[in-house]
Image (cartoon, rainbow, N blue to C red):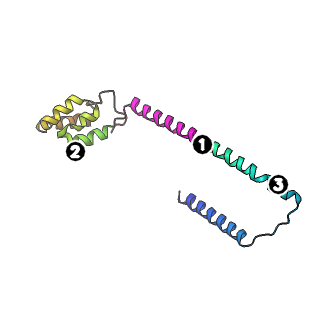
Amino acid sequence: MKKIIFTLLTAVLITLTFNQTRAAFPVAQKTNDASKIINTVTPVTVEEKVASTEAVKENLKADTKKKVKKEKKSFVERVMAAGGKSQLVALLLAFFVGGLGIHRFYLGYTWQGVVQLLTLGGCGIWSLIDFIRIILGDLQPKNGPYDKTL
């Protein structure tokens, strides 16, 4: 990664140096009748090119936004379909805030989480049992098995 950044910065520095060198020593060019005709026609074509370039940029932005929304949607759908539950996260929640029943909310057992919250984890006994059950893999998420296990 550092090599790529260094290479890009070097290329930019060389480009800037080259452009400044050309600007410092301009070359006089001879003009003839053909270049005068081209110069009179050029502003119209340049304006047309700028307009078409802006239209292309707007289309690219719109397409990019659509693709990003679609990718976000598909990522969320994949996570929701998989459940996205980790045994390690459940274990850490049970260890640190087991008395509040947060691990039960995480695993999808809302009512049991509320009861644990009101009873402070059954005075700590229920949360200790849940901690052991999560270690053993006996306490699974409500929608299926863990995606990531210990």
Q: Is residue 21 above or below residue 84?
A: below
Residue 97's image quarter? top left
What residue is shown at x 85% (from left), y 63% (from top)?
Answer: 31
Mark toward the start of the polypeptide (2 vs 3): 3
Q: Are marks 1 and 3 in contact (CB under 8 Å)?
A: no
- Residue underneath mark 1: 58
Q: Is residue 132 magenta?
A: no
Q: Could you give the CA–CA distance between mark 2 and mark 1, rounded to whole angstroms?
A: 50 Å
Q: Which mark is residue 96?
A: 2
Three-letter amino acid code at the position of disc 1: Glu
Residue 96's image quarter? top left
- Residue underneath mark 3: 38
Q: Which is more toward the observer, 124 or 34?
A: 34
Q: Is residue 143 left or right of residue 99?
A: right
Span shown in magenta: 60-85
Decide: few, some or many residues near mark 2? Use Cα within 10 Å; few <14, some 14-19, many ≥20: few
What residue is shown at x 28% (from left), y 38% (from top)?
Answer: 90
Three-letter amino acid code at the position of disc 3: Ile
Three-letter amino acid code at the position of disc 2: Phe
Q: Which is more toward the observer, 22 or 114?
A: 22
Badge nearest the viewer, 2 or 1: 1
Q: Which is more toward the observer, 36 or 104?
A: 36
What residue is shown at x 47% (from left), y 37% (from top)?
Answer: 72
Direction bottom: furthest residue:
24
Q: Are marks 2 and 1 in contact (CB under 8 Å)?
A: no
Q: Is residue 146 left or right of residue 127?
A: right
Residue 2, position as x, y percentages in the image: 53, 60
Mark toward the start of the polypeptide (2 vs 1): 1
Residue 122, position as x, y percentages in the image: 12, 35
